Amino acid sequence: MTGGAGFVGSHLVDALAEENTVTVVDDLSSGSQTHIHEDAKFVHADITAPDVLAELTNSVDVVFHEAAVVSVTESIDNPPTSHEVNTDATLTLLELARERNFRVVLASSAAIYGHPQTLPISESHSKNPTSPYGLDKLTIDHYARIYHDLYDVETVALRYFNIYGPRQSGEYAGVISIFRDQALAGDDLTIEGDGSQTRDFVHIDDVVDANIAAATTDYVGEAYNIGTGHETRIDELTETIIKVADTSASVTHVTPRAGDIEASVADISKAREKLGFTPSVSLNKGIRNLLTET
């Protein structure tokens, strides 16, 4: 697994390590070695370095490809680095899969859609990414399909919507984790804009289930939206977090982020039908668990 020390990857390793032989490769630029399951083998390496992926993909059945430059801002500031990590390394991995016949389950993103024209967003929605990050994800999403169609490589692309859960931290953490930290510190919760923006928040446990389903599905060479199909307003989200946290914190509104998407919610009917994907963690339960984790 690439990126197995990160947010999504480390939870996926936890689900796999006790009954499977799992090797994690991560450069720890955003992940933490403390998050890696003790039964997994860890290789501290950069996936863009020559021969790293070649050395680690002998005799593997599935590669979960989670490593990425995930910051939209960083991709805007430095498109070549974003492309090298997100696109070039993925192409290297797909070439190895073509040669060695292993399956690739890769992390795509709702960022490929850009500003939605219709809701909910289906997989056939127009693709107009607004950042180098989104373009990189769209590119590898297409490459996955092409490698299946041309070379019969087993690929599955999972288009993640807004994931949240434990271990999500740092400058580029999701909004729920940011609000959580603010609430627990007794600070005001800061909303960029008026709070009417909507998102589809999916818990990390459900994302792990989607990845495991993608590793065994017969419906390969395809892409799937991974969300909940439920649309949540940001101002309603802050109300829920304040209530669950039992804090007297209030909400502060600041200038909207330039180019921010106003509304987003996934159509997950394809994932339900072909992956058997059924999200099970409600937003209220997920937030409650997140706020009470130790």
Image (cartoon, grey):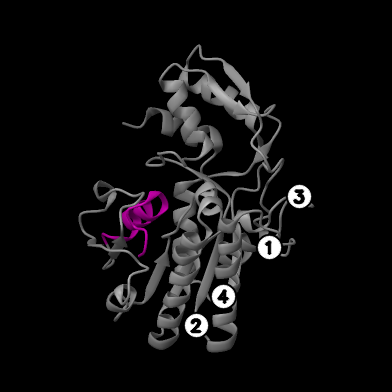
Q: Nearer the viewer, residue 143 or 184?
A: 143
Magenta includes 73? no
Relative to 175, say whether 119 is above or below.
below
Percent position (x, y) of residue 191? 60, 27
Q: Secondary structure at mark 2?
A: loop
Q: Which mark is residue 123?
A: 1
Position of 29 with respect to 135 (left or right) is left
Residue on which the image places disc 3:
119
Cα–Cα span, label 1 and label 3: 11 Å
Of the image marks 2 and 3, the number of the one nearer the N terminus: 3
Q: Amino acid at mark 1?
A: Glu
Residue on which the image places disc 4:
143
User: Which residue is depicted at the point 41% across and 88% down?
Assistant: 99
Give the magenta part as a residue range: 1-18
Of the image marks 1 and 4, the number of the one nearer the N terminus: 1
Q: Looking at the figure, which quarter contains the N terminus?
A: bottom left
Position of 210 with respect to 192 (left or right) is left
